[in-house]
Image: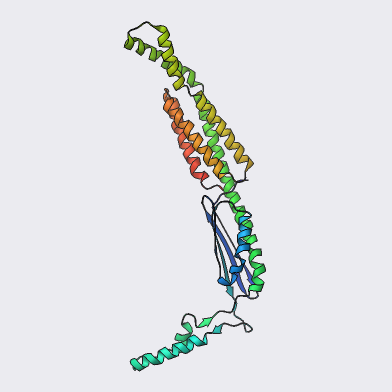
Amino acid sequence: MIFSMTGFATAATELDTGSLAVELRAVNHRYLDLQLRMPDELRMLEPLLREILAAQLTRGKVECRIGFVPRPSVQNPAQLNQPLVRQLAQWSDEVKTILPEADGLSVADVLRWNGVLQSAPIPTDTLQTMVPELLRQVLSEFTAARGREGEKLQEFLLQRIEQIETLCTLVAPRIPAAIAAYEEKLAGRLRIALQTGDDERLRQEITLFASKIDVDEELSRLQTHLVEMKRVLVKGGTVGKRLDFLMQELHREANTLGSKSVDAEVSRASMEMKLLIEQMREQIQNLE
């Protein structure tokens, strides 16, 4: 199986102490770039979480978000930040000294002040077990989603490979006739230009030029690269970099095919090949 580098998955669970959520999302990247966003109280889990992710991911810019919302309770309620409340009261008195007509802070104003109510502490003991467990669950769904996307990309690439193979099959029979026609045309031009009957020299010149326009080798290499692409796609695994290299080779051969061609149909086939190769190259950037 091959995998797309792009993907998304999320999961949440309710604990006695609050709600825990884990989210994974990824986009294309040359290497594996892991970014973890989590409460500071859970930072001690980061090495373990990175190890879990790196065991299944090899490429992509992956963002992992971990959130926990404590559930207030009678046993563990939110705490009042008393030092901050005292500071607010002092500031209120100082302002009223300067502006006697100003309204003082109400209780509601104080409670809305950022930092006055402190959330119940995060239960790190419980989360040390639950966070890795939930991450593995999300990672499993994430990998499955990337696999489904990879299957679509695999089908897309195999279709394009088949189209290029068809073009190669159409081009190959035209090459001998195209070369022969061009040799005849060239011979006539050379005789006129050189005003000579030196057939041996003409034959050497024609043979030399014909070798330059013979595209059998380009067609052979094209077909070899296509066979290798199919082998890589069927084998699966981490294929992105290998396929990207093969795209460069395919484009080089298709470009040479077009530049050496003396036949309009071969030139047209070369253009179609390059278009298909570019379509494949764009999609291969998404593969792990």
Residue at left offset 41%, top offset 14%: 205
Query: Residue 116's spot in the image, x, y percent?
Result: 50, 83
Determine which quarter of the picture holds residue 40.
Answer: bottom right
Residue at left offset 39%, top offset 12%: 187
Query: Residue 112's spot in the image, x, y percent?
Result: 47, 82
Residue furthest to the top in view is 197
Q: Is residue 126 visible?
A: yes
Query: Residue 150's spot in the image, x, y percent?
Result: 58, 47
Q: Nearer the viewer, residue 90 or 275?
A: 90
Quarter the N terminus occupies: top right
Query: Residue 275's spot in the image, x, y percent?
Result: 45, 37
Left or right: 44 as drawn, with respect to 266: right
Asked if 3 appears above or below 218 in the picture, the reply is below
Residue at left offset 35%, top offset 7%: 196
Asked if 283 appears above or below 124 in the picture, the reply is above
Snapshot colouring: rainbow
Q: Is residue 99 visible?
A: no
Asked if 155 appears above or below 179 in the picture, the reply is below
Q: Nearer the viewer, residue 88 or 163?
A: 88
